[in-house]
Amino acid sequence: MFTVGVAVFTAGSAAAALAPAMGVLLAARAVQGAGGALFTPLTLTMLAAVTPSERRGAVLGAWGGIGGLGAALGPLAGG
């Protein structure tokens, strides 16, 4: 599912970059959102599976912190 999500997100990104009209851009952004919804939760699962137990708290905390920063700064940087 992670690979499918990345592929869907990538296809949506390419479609958004090549969008000739606003409607196509909005549809492409919806495809990006669907792809992101597929792969983002799986990143947490994969991190937890590959991280040694003694470092898991720090790694998962960094994952959450980076996600929070992205949510806070994304609109400012992209807006």
Image (tube, rainbow, N blue to C red):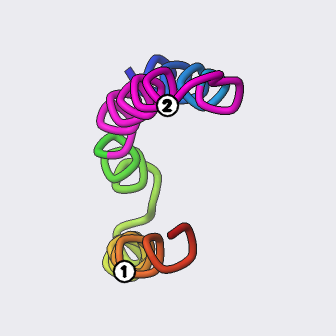
- Check the image and report above or below for 67 versus 3: below
The quadrant of the rendering that contains the N terminus is: top left
Find residue 54 and report its horizontal and vertical position in percent.
38, 77
Tell me: 20 left or right of 73: right
Q: Is residue 38 magenta?
A: yes
Image x and y of residue 47, in percent:
42, 54
Q: Residue at x 43, y 65 (%)?
A: 52
Q: x%, y% of residue 22?
A: 49, 31
Find out whether the residues at labels 2 and 1 contact each other: C-beta distance under 8 Å.
no
- In the rendering, which numbered label is found on residue 34? none
**What mark, if any, has residue 22 been given in the picture?**
2
Question: Which residue occupies the foreground of this view, 47 or 78?
Answer: 78
Left or right: 48 as drawn, with respect to 8: left
Give the prevailing secondary structure in the magenta stretch.
helix
Tell me the amino acid under the disc marked 1. Answer: Ala
Give percent across and percent down for residue 72.
36, 80
Task: Look at 38% across and 69% down and name the residue there.
Answer: 67
Q: Residues within 10 Å of mark 2 (few under 14, many from 20)?
A: few
**Sequence-first disc among 2 and 1:** 2
- Which residue in the structure is indicated by mark 1? 72
Which residue occupies 36% across, 45% down?
A: 40
What is the span of residues highlighted in magenta in the rendered image?
16-40
Which secondary structure, mark 1?
A: helix
Amino acid type, residue under disc 2 in the picture = Met
Task: Decide: few, some or many residues near mark 1? Use Cα within 10 Å; few <14, some 14-19, many ≥20.
Answer: few
